[in-house]
């Protein structure tokens, strides 16, 4: 019987071919640079393996590039043809169906199919990771957590790859606000498998959400040596380190990490772009001179303006266009979102034409200095932005935008309320205490302003 690394039956020409499949999935789990090479080795070993074509189609979808969307659809057709010609297990047939649903934009059916696989095949690591990942970009925090919780009891603590599950579970717990359990699972995963950057990332999120910024910097510094083998996701780790420095008011360190680490390589990858765009936006709103750094990002955003594939990066492309002075292009993206057809199946289109279009409109209004309109657009939807995707830490940029818009719209009472709300969640945010002090001074609360400024200074010290 031919099986993969995790004991799942495989339709393959040989055990060696199944091993190449396992190598590819394992490399993907670790965000390794050699994932593409592993996939090539898999196709060379067995070009007719149904799961090889499924895996390749999944990877095309993960890139979130329009040029690869048709290749993902072709991959789904190829996988179906190989499954029919060669035969496929029921589990593999569900994967073929999941790829077809994903290629059609039907996220709900896609996730449901992966979860159906996991009911009977708790060791299907590919279905597990993809369900976890896709629900994250759907803003389903509970789904991110529960995809792992449902299968974890069926794994043994002695299983060599259980650290991957612990790391994924840690991230789901963190996104659901259970920071103590998230840190416990995350640190266990990192101790067992420090090369698993996703587990490191989960702990980094806990430390960020709890305002343990200096501890977060030390934690990441202790693991940086493992990142050179990691693909572009290592840039996101450097962004997390910069985020700690940002909250401490150490803006020079943020720019240094921007130039030397997470934007040293000028890529078009969507997460790399969102890292850079979100950081420059944060810094510029704090009065930091960012020089000509917007130019490169704006040019790249112009090329991605027609993507409309994933709401979270699309919001950032609007930000880059607006920040770079390309207001016509930014407003064009907003109009294109509003004009998307009402497709009840396509998840991305539904989000983009509703919450996405409103959020994008608030972004353009803000950069056009129509701060009151930005506030009016954002206030009614601020609790409904999770479907846009991204983590709580990433979506915090939109909360910051609303606060700054309220300040610049000369609505200090609202700004005071929003800052009080944010500081209740992030009491160790030096930048927020600084802003709170400024707002309280505007409202003639000199004692409160002085106290807020003292707290900001203490955090920076």
Image (cartoon, rainbow, N blue to C red):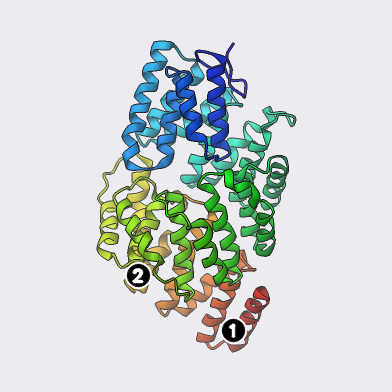
Q: Please name the residue that numbered disc 1 is placed on.
A: 449
How dense is the environment of label 1, judged by Cα within 10 Å: few (below 14), some, or many (20 and up)?
A: many
Q: Position of residue 299 (x, y in %)?
A: 32, 58
Name the image quarter holding residue 295. Answer: bottom left
Going 29% across and 56% down the picture, which residue do you hit? Answer: 333
Q: Is residue 205 above or below residue 152?
A: below
Q: CA distance from mark 2 to mark 1?
A: 28 Å
Mark 2 or mark 1: whose residue is earlier in sequence = 2
Of the pair 413 and 282, the residue shown nearer to us: 282
Q: Position of residue 7 (x, y in %)?
A: 62, 20
Residue 173 appears in the picture as rendered:
no
Going 30% across and 56% down the picture, which residue do you hit? Answer: 302
Going 47% across and 45% down the picture, which residue do you hit? Answer: 137
Look at the numbered discs 2 and 1 and tell me whether their residues touch, using CB distance below 8 Å: no
How dense is the environment of label 2, judged by Cα within 10 Å: few (below 14), some, or many (20 and up)?
A: some
Q: Please name the residue that numbered disc 2 is placed on.
A: 367
Left or right of 229? Residue 59 is left
Q: Position of residue 123 (x, y in %)?
A: 61, 26
């Amino acid at each position: 019987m031919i099986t993969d690394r995790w004991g799942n039956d495989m339709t393959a020409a040989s055990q060696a071919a199944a091993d190449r499949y396992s190598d590819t999935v394992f490399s993907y789990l670790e965000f390794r640079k050699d994932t593409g090479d592993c996939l090539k080795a898999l196709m060379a070993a067995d070009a007719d393996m149904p799961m090889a074509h499924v895996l390749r189609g999944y990877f095309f979808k993960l890139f979130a590039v329009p040029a690869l969307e048709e290749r993902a659809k072709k991959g789904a057709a190829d996988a179906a043809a190989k499954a029919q010609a060669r035969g496929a297990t029921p589990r593999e047939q569900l994967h073929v169906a999941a790829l077809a649903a994903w290629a059609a934009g039907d996220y709900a059916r896609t996730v449901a199919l992966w979860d159906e696989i996991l009911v009977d095949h708790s060791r299907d690591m590919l279905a597990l990771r993809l369900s976890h990942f896709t629900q994250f970009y759907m803003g389903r925090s509970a789904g991110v957590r529960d995809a792992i919780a449902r299968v974890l009891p069926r794994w043994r603590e002695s299983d060599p790859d259980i650290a991957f599950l612990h790391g994924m579970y840690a991230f789901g717990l963190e996104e659901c606000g259970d920071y103590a359990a998230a840190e416990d699972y995350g640190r266990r995963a990192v101790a067992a498998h420090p090369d698993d950057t996703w587990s490191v990332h989960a702990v980094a999120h806990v430390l960020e959400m709890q305002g343990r910024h200096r501890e977060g910097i030390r934690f990441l510094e202790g693991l940086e040596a493992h990142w050179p083998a990691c693909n572009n996701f290592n840039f996101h780790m450097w962004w997390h380190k910069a985020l700690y420095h940002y909250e401490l008011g150490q803006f020079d360190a943020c720019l240094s990490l921007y130039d030397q680490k997470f934007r040293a390589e000028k890529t078009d990858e969507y997460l790399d772009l969102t890292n850079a765009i979100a950081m420059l936006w944060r810094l510029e709103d704090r009065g930091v001179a960012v020089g000509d750094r917007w130019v490169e990002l704006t040019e790249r955003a112009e090329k991605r303006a027609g993507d409309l594939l994933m709401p979270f990066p699309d919001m950032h492309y609007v930000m880059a266009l607006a920040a770079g002075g390309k207001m016509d292009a930014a407003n064009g993206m907003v109009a294109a979102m509003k004009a998307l057809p009402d497709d009840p199946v396509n998840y991305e289109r539904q989000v983009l034409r509703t919450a996405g279009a409103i959020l994008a409109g608030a972004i353009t209004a803000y950069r056009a200095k129509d701060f009151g309109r930005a506030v009016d657009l954002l206030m009614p939807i601020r609790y409904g932005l999770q479907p846009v995707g991204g983590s709580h830490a990433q979506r915090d940029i939109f909360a910051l935008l609303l606060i700054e818009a309220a300040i610049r719209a000369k609505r200090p009472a609202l700004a005071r309320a929003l800052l009080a709300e944010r500081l209740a969640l992030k009491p160790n945010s030096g930048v927020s205490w600084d802003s709170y002090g400024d707002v309280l001074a505007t409202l003639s609360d000199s004692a409160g302003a002085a106290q807020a400024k003292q707290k900001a200074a203490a955090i920076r010290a």
